[in-house]
């Protein structure tokens, strides 16, 4: 059956969009691969009324509430291809199954391209961190570091001292200019020029950073601004325009979260510069309400 909307991605942004449409009585299909970006973290922080809750538990609760609406349908799996058809769009699930809808919401998220360092992967989301607003408080006053992996790493190094004593690991990169060094000094940030070769500790807990010269700098957590890439090729297949964001490509949208392809909306990390669960949910609300109004007013204007 054709739906009013197909939503690709069942995390904060996608479920928030679906809720708006479900409450308006519109038929919605949520296609979900069950691989949310924050699945590596034990807790989500800073989200209204949910501080400290487990991300998967939050998603499961939201999904259960959404499932109570009779016009909502869930498909577990991945959308591997999408294209325009008369009166809407078709989605290929890769198993001979196809879904059609008048409109689409892209909410499939991004993938973090982590530095290739021994001992890092298992610590991601636990003691190797991206967002201080999400996880900084849990390490407040402890020994912190910032790994230099991109231009914005200096910005991060200047922020982190609000949470604890900070070392900026240049990781073999160039020494910052004199003005930046002065700012780091004023923020009491220590600069370590040597290249990092490994992260020490247990599978999930960081105890130190091993440098190329054999030294180990003791740490409790390290922040890194990893680049991101789209978790799906769907937006590119549809012809959506992209902009280069601070961390990677971002789908271009207007204030109502519609992409450059009419009828296709994008919400969450794929469509904004700053990544945060609250922003993702808010984007989903905007996309869902905008899509609903388009279903009403576009036919009236024809």
Image (cartoon, rainbow, N blue to C red):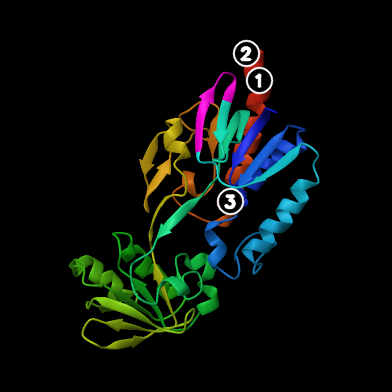
The residue where tag 2 is placed is 301
Question: Is 54 placed left or right of 68 in the picture?
Answer: left
Quarter of the N terminus within the rendering: top right
Sequence order check: which comes first, mark 2 or mark 3?
3
The quadrant in which residue 157 appears is: bottom left
Vertical comparison of 12 with 119: above or below: above
- Segment tinted magenta in the rendering: 81-88
79 lies left or right of 116: right
* 76 in relation to 106, above or below: below
Q: Mark 3 and 1 residues: CB-CB less than 8 Å, in contact?
A: no
State which quadrant residue 130 falls in.
Answer: bottom left
The residue pinned by badge 1 equals: 297
Kindly identify which residue carries mark 3: 33
Q: Earlier in the sequence, mark 3 or mark 1?
A: 3
- Residue 233 visible? The answer is yes
- In the rendered view of the protein, which quadrant contains the C terminus? top right
Question: Residue 192, which numbered label?
Answer: none
**Residue 87 forms part of the magenta stretch:** yes
């Amino acid at each position: 059956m054709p739906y009013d909307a197909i939503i690709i991605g069942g995390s904060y942004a996608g479920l928030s969009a679906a809720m708006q449409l479900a409450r308006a009585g519109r038929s919605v299909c949520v296609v979900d691969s069950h691989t949310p970006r924050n699945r590596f973290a034990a807790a989500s922080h800073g989200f209204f009324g949910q501080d400290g809750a487990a991300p998967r538990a939050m998603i499961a609760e939201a999904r259960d509430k959404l499932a109570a609406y009779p016009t909502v349908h869930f498909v577990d799996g991945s959308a591997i291809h999408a294209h325009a058809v008369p009166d809407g769009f078709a989605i290929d699930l890769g198993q001979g199954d196809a879904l059609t809808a008048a409109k689409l919401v892209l909410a499939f998220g991004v993938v973090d391209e982590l530095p290739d360092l021994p001992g890092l992967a298992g610590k991601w989301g636990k003691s190797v961190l991206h967002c201080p607003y999400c996880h900084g408080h849990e390490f407040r006053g402890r020994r912190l570091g910032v790994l230099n992996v991109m231009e914005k790493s200096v910005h991060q190094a200047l922020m982190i001292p609000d949470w604890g004593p900070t070392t900026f690991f240049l990781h073999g990169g160039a020494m910052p200019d004199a003005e930046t060094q002065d700012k780091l000094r004023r923020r009491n940030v220590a600069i370590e020029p040597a290249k990092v070769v490994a992260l020490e500790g247990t599978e999930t807990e960081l105890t130190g950073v091993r440098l190329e010269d054999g030294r180990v700098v003791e740490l409790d957590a390290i922040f890194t601004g990893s680049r991101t890439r789209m978790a799906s090729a769907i937006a590119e297949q549809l012809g959506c325009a992209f902009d280069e964001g601070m961390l990677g490509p971002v789908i271009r949208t207007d204030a109502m979260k519609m992409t450059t392809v009419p009828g296709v909306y994008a919400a969450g990390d794929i469509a904004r510069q700053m990544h945060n669960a609250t922003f993702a949910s808010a984007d989903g609300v905007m996309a869902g309400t905008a899509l609903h109004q388009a279903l009403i007013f576009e036919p009236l204007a024809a």
